[in-house]
Image (cartoon, grey):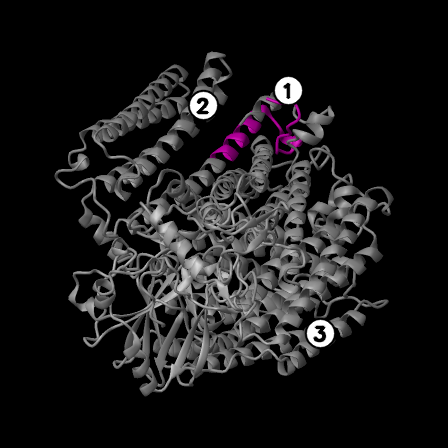
């Protein structure tokens, strides 16, 4: 995008192919490092959640009369996100086989599913809020909004990358470069799906599970 | 050479300084002499390491300083030497850690015959509660706190009725009685710290923390706060007085119980209400009542006085000015005092009580006295 | 990702205009200088704040500082020094400059992200500095920002200061993460031919491991910062218990202040090593070069860095021995803390053993390195006092702690920073720093700081509590302690003011310094082998260097010169490969 960046490869053997491959390798490593940091972030939030849930004022949202006892809306959202991940996987596989059209199709479908997931999450928020479960009401509510919000924010940043890639596809840049981006997006989405599944399981599990985890970690 | 000499001098001076400096630990007044012993052991081990490493460094600097024709030895590593050094270091570490953990084991296991007393921290003052005859302390909650019940004791808990409440900054303890300090804060973090006891612990709102110690030396010791608790942190002080068992009993008998505080004496005069209020709301952390220096203007002799404000104008301290200074403290700042007070949301009755109390601290004929003012319809008993 | 595009057009175009060359630059060297100058600038603010505090402690009332201001100065001094100066300077400054040059890369792997990292860092600094100008001023909660106090009435700056502080920290973490991604990926992926991990200079190892710590530990600060921000702004109760505040009951309930402390120190302790590990690495390189001897026990030094980095995640609660947490944690954390002393001690031994049988040149960088060894040894040993739980109990929250952490993560790393600047300035600017001013600067700084902090420990032994605006009326403090405080203040002001020498030297030498050769210290490591000094954009000219050996081949027997550069092949000097293998 600018004219003064130097690639990190010995010019003796710089072929076009080599640069793209190095580039992809760097980006893959960079993404993995980023995901490590994000894992640490979500892990620490979860530890804080566990620990805070052991105080007496915590009222789980999963008790029988509470809104998350039958979280069908979250199930729907989970399925949406899982579809997004599957579509990305399909896009990645097609990309590796150099089937650019299928790949791009998968890529775009994945983005649409992700948007649907975000909208779904937002509607869950609205539902909760309309039932009077506001963020400051109880630590359980606070953590629900905080964790889902943080996850959604990460997905949103992913979608920004998705939009940029789509723009590239629209402008018909060489598929070799799009391919790298598709692969990166797929990895990022799989990570976010994994995080979501963990969060989903935690947010909807009964307080006894928390107690067990907490006592396992010596928090009780 | 110069470098080596200066470093050698520095090490020697440090050693001499260590033995000759006047800043010793305070006189020990508790059973925690063993803590002092672990400190001595740590000093000894660390001192030996310090001198040994520095002596070797100085030797190297002298012996291997650059001279014409000298070359360094090429020696990437020496596993054996490194192994020995790790072993010796580990021994030194163990020599410090083992006694430390043994003493810490005693620190976390109070003996069976402890007396339990409660320390309550509040910005920026101390209060204390001792169990009554039943030896049990009543349950507490922030929700119960009101003007009559600054400790927040559950009024329905039978164990709490005979609790002895000491809402001053002074605590008496009997000599040689193992004591567990139950620590409770009703606002932010504090730390109950008496240098002479050696032990200290944070007060954490929401939980009760504790530590134990046995006072072993009669005397009057200062209680400090050792955890930053806001702008008056450095002023959050009190006294611990260690006395004989008999003197302690005598002091105890002067203290009033929760039940009497709660029920008795309902017809408090305005002045007493004011005193209670200023006590509960922590005013005294910043406003002294005995004429001593404090963060805000002292109240002794304040009423009726003419103060110079920060803009140079004068004002006579009267009801209206006091009220304004409570509700909107930054409106008129007395010259020489920082603008740190937060606005307090008192009712008009409360403000007139506080004003009456401040008025009662007038100086008459050169001495402070709590005068019998027309407003004061119930004289306060001397403490 | 974008630069593959450029490769198609034959990469390597120089930035042309002033703006792309010096301001919106993606060159790691320019970004490093931007980072360093910004960090030094905020550092100077923090230095002035410390002078103001010292005036209040030594000569109370002379400047008319009130308690509110004192606590604000204290908080901002601590936070700026730890985060915005030391972390930013070591990672953003030295990390940026040294990593690509030392591993033989043309730049960081993601130059655009690298540039963004600096601008986001600058934004965090601006937000922080802005808090001096908002109603109520900056926060006075202490750099640890413990709730409930940090966000409840009675603490300075609870209106806006604390919000700006938390936002600034969150923004800083974003910047540090963007930088960190670059440093780690560059070390992992962009090393030149022959530069194996075990041939990297210890500076790179120190910065590399410190960056990994930062990437794993900063999230803890992020988590606690975001949660506290929620507590403050929308009334959640993550950390806020049921409590009163100045006599008024609060709407919060059930939160845990200790949870915050756990999260904070889970970040806070690795943070100590985020600052210390780069210093360890850099000082190793300085000692080796100026003693003309290989670093002693290179492998052990690497493993020590890795071990310290790993252990630093399981010692955090030694900051909380008197916090009211479960007292049985004390046994565990005291033990882990004292175990970490073993690899740390080994590093001290190996530095002195590097001097042993060396050929020691007392250059200015070497003087600073020696000053570091002494200071760090004192600071490390006093750390054993505080890590051993029972000894910590009387000493915690006293001036012993203040003296300890200023020695170990204030003075010691700063001495390394000075040493490193004297060492690498010729490479950065092409000119030498003035030697005489440098020596004067060293002696004033080293002896001065020792005079400040060594006696300060004894104030703590006596039990004098820290974070006190005034000691007036305390009976257990003898008059001599006040005299000592005055002495410390006088020395501190002198040392503070004399840093002008350094700033003067820095700018004077830009124009008037002696021209430096490509390799003025005759060092073996890669950054001194660039074709140009200062290195041009792209660092290495047309060809990337090829590395044949580790960075410490000094005084190898049978070789005429007393150093062999990393780019020298074995057969060209006729010697055996070094112990670490020479598979080129």
Residue A60 visible, this angle: yes
Estimate how packed mark 3 is, as few (under 14), some (14 to 19) or many (20 or more) residues with alpha carbons within 10 Å. Answer: some
Q: Which residue in the structure is indicated by mark 1?
A: C9
Judge the density around disc 2: few (<14), some (14-19), many (≥20) Cα neighbours within 10 Å. Answer: many
Closest to the observer, C35 or A124: A124
SS label for mark 1: loop
Residues marked 2 and 3, same chain? no
Q: Mark 3 falls within which chain?
A: B
Residue at screen point 34% across, 33% down? A149
In the drawing, does residue B300 fall left or right of residue A72? right
Which residue sits at x=22%, y=27%? A76
Q: Residues within 10 Å of mark 1 (few under 14, many from 20)?
A: few
Circle 2 is placed at which residue position? Answer: A179
Q: Are marks 2 and 3 in contact (CB under 8 Å)?
A: no
Location of the N terminus of chain B (image quadrant): bottom right
> Dot 3: what SS?
helix
**Location of residue C292 in the rendering, given as x and y in whole percent from the top left corner:** 74, 61
Mark 1 in CB contact with mark 3 (< 8 angstroms): no
Q: Is residue A80 above or below residue A65?
A: above
Name the residue carrying label 3. B10
Horizontally, residue C108 falls left or right of residue C419, namely: left
Q: Nearer the viewer, residue C196 or B176?
A: B176
Residue A90, horizontal then vertical, whole percent: 33, 24
- Magenta stretch: give its range: A1-28
Q: Please identify the quarter of the rendering in which residue C362 is found.
A: bottom right
| Residue appearing at x 64%, y 75% in the figure | C480
């Amino acid at each position: 995008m600018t004219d003064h960046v130097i690639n990190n490869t010995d010019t003796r053997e710089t072929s076009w192919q080599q640069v793209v491959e190095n580039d992809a390798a760097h980006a893959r490593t960079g993404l993995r490092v980023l995901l490590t940091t994000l894992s640490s972030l979500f892990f620490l939030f979860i530890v804080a959640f566990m620990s805070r849930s052991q105080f007496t004022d915590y009222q789980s949202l999963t008790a029988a009369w509470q809104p998350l006892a039958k979280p069908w809306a979250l199930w729907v959202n989970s399925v949406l996100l899982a579809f997004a991940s599957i579509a990305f996987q399909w896009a990645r596989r097609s990309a590796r086989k150099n089937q650019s059209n299928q790949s791009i199709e998968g890529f775009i479908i994945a983005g649409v599913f992700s948007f649907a997931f975000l909208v779904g999450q937002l509607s869950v928020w609205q539902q909760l809020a309309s039932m009077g479960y506001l963020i400051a009401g109880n630590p359980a509510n606070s953590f629900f909004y905080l964790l889902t919000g943080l996850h959604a924010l990460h997905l949103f940043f992913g979608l920004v990358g998705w939009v940029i890639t789509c723009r590239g596809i629209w402008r018909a840049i060489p598929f070799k470069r799009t391919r790298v981006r598709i692969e990166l997006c797929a990895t990022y989405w799989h990570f976010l799906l994994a995080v979501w599944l963990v969060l989903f399981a935690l947010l909807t599990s009964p307080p006894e599970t928390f107690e067990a985890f907490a006592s396992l970690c010596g928090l009780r | 050479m110069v470098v080596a000499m200066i470093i050698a001098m520095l090490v020697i001076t440090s050693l001499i300084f260590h033995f000759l400096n006047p800043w010793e630990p305070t006189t020990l007044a508790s059973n925690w002499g063993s803590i002092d012993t672990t400190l001595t052991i740590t000093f000894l081990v660390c001192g030996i390491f310090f001198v040994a490493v520095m002596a070797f460094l100085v030797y190297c600097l002298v012996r291997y300083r650059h001279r014409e024709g000298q070359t360094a030895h090429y020696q990437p590593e020496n596993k054996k030497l490194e192994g020995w050094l790790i072993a010796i270091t580990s021994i030194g570490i163990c020599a410090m850690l083992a006694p430390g953990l043994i003493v810490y084991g005693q620190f976390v296991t109070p003996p069976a015959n402890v007396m339990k007393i409660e320390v309550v921290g509040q910005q920026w003052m101390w209060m204390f509660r001792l169990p009554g005859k039943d030896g049990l302390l009543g349950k507490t909650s922030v929700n119960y706190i009101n003007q009559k019940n600054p400790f927040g004791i559950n009024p329905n808990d039978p164990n709490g009725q005979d609790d002895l409440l000491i809402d001053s900054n002074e605590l008496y303890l009997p000599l040689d009685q193992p004591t567990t300090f139950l620590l409770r804060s009703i606002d932010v973090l504090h730390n109950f710290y008496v240098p002479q006891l050696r032990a200290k612990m944070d007060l954490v709102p929401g939980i009760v923390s504790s530590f134990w110690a046995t006072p072993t030396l009669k005397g009057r010791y200062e209680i400090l706060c050792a955890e930053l608790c806001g702008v008056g942190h450095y002023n959050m002080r009190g006294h611990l007085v260690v006395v004989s068992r008999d003197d302690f009993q005598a002091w105890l008998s002067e203290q009033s119980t929760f039940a009497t505080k709660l029920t008795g004496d309902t017809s408090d005069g305005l002045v007493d209400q004011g005193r209670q209020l200023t006590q509960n709301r922590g005013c005294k952390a910043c406003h002294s009542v005995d004429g001593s220096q404090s963060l805000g203007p002292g109240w002794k002799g304040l009423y009726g006085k003419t103060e110079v404000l920060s803009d140079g104008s004068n004002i006579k301290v009267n009801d209206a000015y006091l009220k304004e200074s409570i509700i909107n403290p930054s409106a008129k700042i007395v010259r020489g005092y920082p603008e740190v007070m937060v606005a307090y949301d008192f009712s008009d009755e409360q403000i007139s009580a506080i004003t009456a109390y401040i008025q009662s601290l007038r100086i008459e004929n050169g001495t402070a006295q709590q005068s019998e003012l027309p407003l004061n319809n119930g004289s306060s008993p001397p403490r | 990702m974008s630069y593959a595009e450029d490769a198609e057009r034959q990469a390597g175009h120089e930035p042309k205009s002033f703006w792309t060359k010096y301001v919106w630059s993606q060159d790691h060297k320019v970004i490093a200088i931007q980072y360093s100058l910004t960090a030094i600038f905020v550092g100077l603010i923090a230095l002035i704040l410390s002078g103001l505090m010292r005036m209040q402690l030594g000569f109370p009332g002379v400047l008319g500082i009130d308690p509110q201001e004192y606590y604000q100065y204290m908080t901002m001094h601590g936070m700026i020094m730890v985060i915005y100066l030391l972390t930013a300077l070591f990672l953003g400054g030295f990390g940026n400059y040294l990593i690509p040059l030392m591993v033989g890369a043309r730049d960081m792997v993601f130059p655009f992200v690298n540039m963004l990292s600096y601008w986001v860092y600058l934004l965090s600094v601006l937000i922080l500095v802005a808090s001096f100008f908002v109603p109520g001023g900056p926060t006075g909660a202490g750099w640890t920002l413990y709730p409930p106090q940090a966000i409840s009435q009675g603490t300075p700056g609870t209106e806006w200061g604390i919000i700006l502080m938390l936002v600034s920290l969150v923004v800083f973490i974003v910047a540090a993460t963007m930088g960190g991604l670059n440093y780690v990926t560059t070390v992992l992926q962009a090393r030149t031919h022959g530069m194996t991990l075990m041939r990297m200079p210890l500076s790179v190892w120190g910065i590399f491991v410190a960056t990994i710590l930062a990437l794993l530990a900063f999230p803890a600060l992020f988590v606690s910062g975001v949660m506290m921000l929620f507590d403050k702004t929308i009334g959640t109760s993550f950390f806020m218990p049921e409590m009163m505040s100045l006599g008024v009951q609060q709407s919060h309930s059930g939160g845990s202040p200790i949870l915050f402390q756990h999260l904070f120190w889970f970040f806070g302790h690795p943070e100590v090593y985020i600052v210390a590990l780069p210093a360890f690495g850099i000082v190793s390189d300085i000692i080796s070069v100026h003693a003309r001897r290989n670093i002693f026990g290179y492998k052990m030094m690497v493993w020590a860095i890795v071990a310290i980095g790993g252990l630093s995640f399981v010692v955090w609660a030694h900051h909380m021995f008197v916090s009211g947490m479960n007292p049985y944690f004390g046994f565990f954390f005291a033990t882990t803390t004292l175990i970490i002393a073993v690899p740390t001690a080994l590093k001290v031994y190996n530095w002195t053993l590097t001097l042993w049988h060396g050929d020691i040149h007392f250059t200015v960088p070497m003087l600073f390195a020696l000053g570091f060894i002494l200071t760090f040894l004192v600071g490390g040993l006093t750390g054993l006092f505080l890590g051993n739980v029972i000894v910590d109990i009387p000493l915690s929250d006293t001036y012993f702690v203040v003296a300890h952490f200023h020695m170990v993560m204030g003075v010691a790393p700063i001495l390394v920073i000075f040493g490193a600047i004297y060492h690498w300035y010729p490479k950065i600017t092409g000119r030498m720093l003035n030697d005489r001013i440098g020596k004067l600067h060293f002696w004033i700084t080293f002896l001065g700081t020792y005079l400040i902090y060594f006696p300060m420990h004894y104030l703590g032994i006596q039990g004098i509590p820290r974070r006190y605006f005034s000691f007036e009326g305390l009976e257990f403090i003898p008059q001599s302690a006040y005299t000592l405080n005055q002495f410390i203040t006088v020395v501190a002001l002198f040392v503070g003011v004399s840093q002008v020498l350094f700033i003067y030297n820095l700018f004077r030498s830009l124009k008037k310094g002696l021209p430096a050769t490509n390799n003025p210290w005759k060092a073996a490591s890669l950054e001194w082998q660039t074709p140009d000094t200062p290195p041009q954009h792209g660092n290495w000219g047309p060809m990337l260097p090829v590395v044949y050996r580790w960075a410490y081949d000094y005084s190898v027997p049978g070789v005429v010169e007393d150093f062999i550069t990393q780019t020298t092949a074995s057969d060209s000097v006729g010697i055996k490969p070094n112990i670490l293998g020479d598979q080129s």
